[in-house]
Amino acid sequence: MPKMKVAVIGPGSVGGYYGGVLARHGEEVSLIARPGAHFDAIKANGLQLRTNWGDFTVNPQVTSDTREVGPVDFVLYAVKLFHNEVALPLIEPLLKDGTTVLTIQNGVDSADVIAERYGWEHVMAGATYIETGRPEPGVIHQSGPTARIAFGEQDGSRTERTETVFNLLNKTGIQPEIGDDIAVTLWTKLVNVGPIGTVMTASRGSFVEVLDSPWGEYTVRSVMEDVERVARAKGVNLAPDVVDEKLRDGIAEAAEAQASLQGDFRAGNQLEIEHLLGMVVREGRALNVPVAASAALVTSLWKFRNGSVSE
């Protein structure tokens, strides 16, 4: 397969991991990052990755200006949802006929937002399952055997571009999966990461500590059931046992659980709460679906949504 020209918008712990793996395997990768300590560290020392498949350093192009990169074959869009206003215009200089923009943002409507601006001919929805962190600028730590990206066309069809994206991502350190119902994929992930990450953040604890509390598991289940109810009310055909399955998976992996929401909270950064469980509450209220547990969690974190404030 010929080398592809790839741009990663948002090369933090998730986007940077995938961009680093693609660069390691010979793809022509450019990282689109905001100026700052992470940007400077990559410029000076390369992007250092510590992974389940070994440690390595790559030296991709890093820039804040996509005009320096120009049109590419593939864009991986991995910024936080609240950065969309600034990040969405960065896509335009990267586009040409046949460019695919794969979004792996959290939430369920990221692809719709991008497609409204650039068209579905360029956009594909995806979800990633990975445990990563950024222990210091320019360094990404990935743990565990899972680094999965599930993606697909809106109608679930297998197309030339789904095969092209699969072949690009099908490398040691990435497990690609073409989905036949991307809405189910996105909402199933939200059933998992939205409740667990938000309960961890609100409780200021690890998931192990959440489960050790008398009503921790009950609380997480209640929030998962909120998400499930909203998804079903919107016509999403989730598996009948989705809550049981995702709760069981979460408990089995509790010791390794990391939540980007909690990491942002601890760092005093802006939170995605409004776009994740906040979206569930808004949709639930609009559809007259009970979402009390989710509303309580969102309310408990609402004053922190724009970043650090004194508690």
Image (cartoon, rainbow, N blue to C red):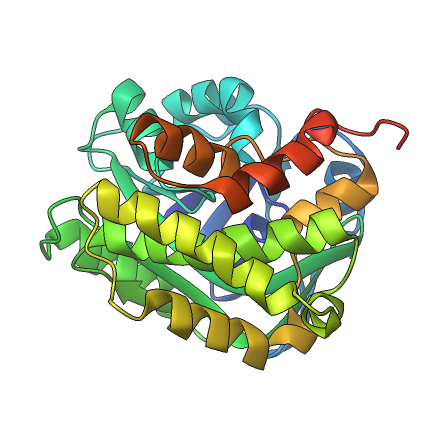
Determine whether 137 is above or below 18 in the image.
Answer: above
**233 with respect to 25 (left or right):** left
Viewer-closest of 47 and 59: 47
Front-most of 252 and 110?
Answer: 252
202 up-or-down from 177: above or below: above
Residue 87 location in percent, x, y?
51, 25
Q: Camera-side residue: 38 or 24?
A: 38
Residue at 11% of width from left, 46% of height from top?
A: 155
| 296 left or right, relative to 35 | left
Q: Position of residue 52 (x, y in %)?
A: 61, 78
Location of the C terminus by quadrant is top right
Look at the image and tell me whether residue 239 can be seen: yes
Residue at the image point whose x is 39% and y is 45% from the top: 5
**Is residue 181 found left or right of 61 in the rendered image?**
left
Residue 243 sits in quarter: bottom left
Q: x%, y% of residue 113?
A: 34, 26
Residue 215 image-quadrant placement: bottom right
Task: State the image quarter where residue 224 is shown.
Answer: bottom left
Residue 71 to residue 257: above or below: above
- Residue 22 can be seen in this image: no
Nearer to the camera, 154 or 294: 294
Residue ranking furthest to the right: 310
Q: How many numbered dots are placed on residues in this image?
A: 0
Q: Quadrant of the N terminus?
A: bottom left
Relative placement, left or right, of 295 versus 163 is right
The residue lying at 65 percent from left, 65 percent from top is 216
Residue at image point 75% right, 53% down: 203
